[in-house]
Amino acid sequence: MQIEEFLENSARLHPNKVALICKDERLTYRQLEERANQLAYALIEAGVQRGDRVVTFLPNSVEAVVSIFATLKAGAVFSVLNPTTKPDKLTYILNNCRASAMITGGPNACATAAWGRIPHLHSVFMLDATDAQAESVRAARKHLIRLEDVGTAGDATPPAKKCIDIDLAALIYTSGSTGHPKGVMVTHLNILSAATSITTYLENTSDDVVLNVLPLAFDYGLYQLLMMFKVGGTLVLHDSFAFPTVVIDKMIHEGVTGFPIVPTISAILLQMDLSKYSFPKLRYISNTAAALPVEHIHKLRSLFPNVALYSMYGLTECKRASYLPPSQLDKRPTSVGRGMPNEEVYVVDEAGNRVGSGVAGELVIRGANVMKGYWELPEETDRCLKPGPLPGEKVLYSGDLFRADEEGYLYFVGRKDDIIKTRGEKVSPREVEDVLYGIDGIAEAAVIGIPDKILGNAIKAVLSLRAGSQITEQDVLRHCRTLLEDFMVPKVVEFVASLPKTESGKISKRAIVERQQEPAEPALKS
Amino acid sequence: MHSEMAGQAHFQRDVRNFIVNNFLFGQPLELQADESLLRKGVIDSTGVLELVAFLEGEYGIKVEDDEVVPENLDSIASVAAYLAKKLSSRS
């Protein structure tokens, strides 16, 4: 089975059912299927071939949803990028995956003015292109197709199938420890396996209405779409949680049954007075990306007494690794549970041998949900996909340390590398440090995570300046903001005379972290 | 009416200063008073919290949960109008 069939099957079974609600638009499965078919034909017409990469660079929107399924229907590989991605990184990714087409629109579409530096890209599908935007694309000898000129109805027949289920369906970019983003290669079969396991334990049916406020570039957000279309449910797509009461009103109005959150959303929710609302339809809340503080779990349980709360853990490389059945939550609030249906997870020591309960080690994931590797990064792939129990088999080493209790429930211990989780997103300190070193006058830079009530971890930059440099915190942050996505921009900057070093003369992150004597930083800047 | 307009212009200046300093870190960006801060990528969900904290700290008002809506907070002009309304209802 291929992922575009999630939409095709639901369009056949529930043609007139509302599949997607986004702002003022409500689209049925049939309408979405027709629009996706039209765009698929336009992609093929533009020269997109089986296995080509097509980048979607749009905010959460109907067009983003249509573009994902259209790309798959054309036999190509989709990659959704966060709309706050800055031009340099966007250019890097377009070149890294050698995208042949890009689907974009809105004010961010001009974020990549560097069309001339992206040789493989031959077609740009743009929504509401201004004359200047259209001209800049054409000047680089690329084909500009106005998205609004692509038909919205007509041929209801999808293009002929070209792929098989072990072909790539998506590249999902994630932070890499080297500083450059890595493309996680997932096949149709990977997505089908993960979506089947997750919808099984969440007990999703076509009666579900899921509210998604997370970016579709984030696998957790993307899967809300894929899973609802798989079961024939309804997705309410929103672009952020910035205005919580707007989201809550929508939840109640649309009779939302499932609400996926990250700890930052829970922190915001718990600051509000929710006593005047009731959520009679809400069936479950799921959390992943980072563990919910136990205090949040207790408060959410009392605010939503009849709602199942799922604590989950995963990484893009396998989509999801574990979930805690809600019935276990009161007994083991700090656990992220056990492996999903049709998946095996276990803890190993440094030599790769399974360890017993209570012993910390690296979590290994075995299942058809595990990615094929990182796009064109064989060495990085070999570091996390290692031989498994069967000859020739590869299993995923998560890079996360866990211990299991006697019944096999998992507890997070820490990370093997220095990746920071902030707002549920992974940030590579190296990526931020590379940007900081680009500022003239900075001698040394180290980026660490510090505890933060809202963000989980806040990014802190510790810097030393060259003699005579007059750089201020404002200068540093302004520079970061132009080159990094919002969640990567440091929240705190500290200037020091020099950074502590190890015996070999390298900057010692450990010593810097140990210096952070203060307890929790205030959640927000004053 | 005249003084209310003048007050709003004053609020717009304060709010713009706060936004430019806190979210753009002084980076010059063409930002119309009625442009959506969210869509322009200037603020996000934690940015809205910071904006609320600024309004409460600077003007001594209490921003109620149901006032945290785009009509009140999604552009420099709407924040200024919200502030003017909020402060006049207090006096």
Image: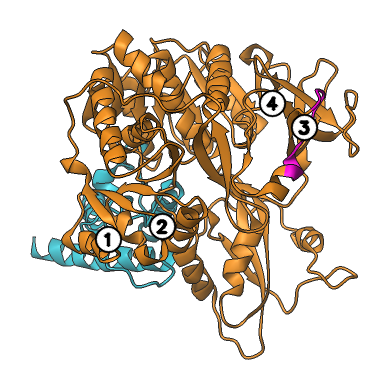
Q: Secondary structure at mark 3?
A: strand
Instruction: Write down the region rendered in magenta.
Output: A382-391
Q: Amino acid at mark 1?
A: Val
Judged left or right of residue A401, residue A258 is left
Q: Secondary structure at mark 2?
A: helix
Q: Amino acid at mark 2?
A: Phe
- Report, in whole angstroms, how far the alpha carbon at label 3 lies from the one at label 2: 43 Å
For mark 4, name the chain.
A
Residue at 62 percent across and 91 percent down: it is A468
Judged left or right of residue A435, residue B26 is left
Is A388 within the magenta?
Answer: yes
Residue marked by disc 3: A363
Q: Judge by depth and name the residue closer to the eye, A434 or A114.
A: A114
Is A95 within the magenta?
Answer: no
- Report, in whole angstroms, how far the alpha carbon at label 4 lies from the one at label 2: 37 Å
Label 2 vs label 1, nearer the camera: 1
Q: Secondary structure at mark 4?
A: loop
Shade of chain A as shown in the rendered figure: orange
Q: Residues within 10 Å of mark 4 (few under 14, many from 20)?
A: many
Q: Is residue A504 above or below residue B59?
A: below
Q: Of callouts 1 and 4, which one flags the residue occurring earlier in the amino acid sequence? A: 1
Residue marked by disc 1: A137
Residue marked by disc 4: A336
Label 4 vs label 2, nearer the camera: 4
Could you tell me residue A430's position as x and y percent? Answer: 65, 61
Q: Of callouts 3 and 1, which one flags the residue occurring earlier in the amino acid sequence? A: 1
- Do badges 1 and 4 share one subunit? yes
Q: Judge by depth and name the residue closer to the eye, A480 or A387.
A: A387
For mark 3, name the chain.
A
Residue marked by disc 2: B54
Shade of chain B as shown in the rendered figure: cyan
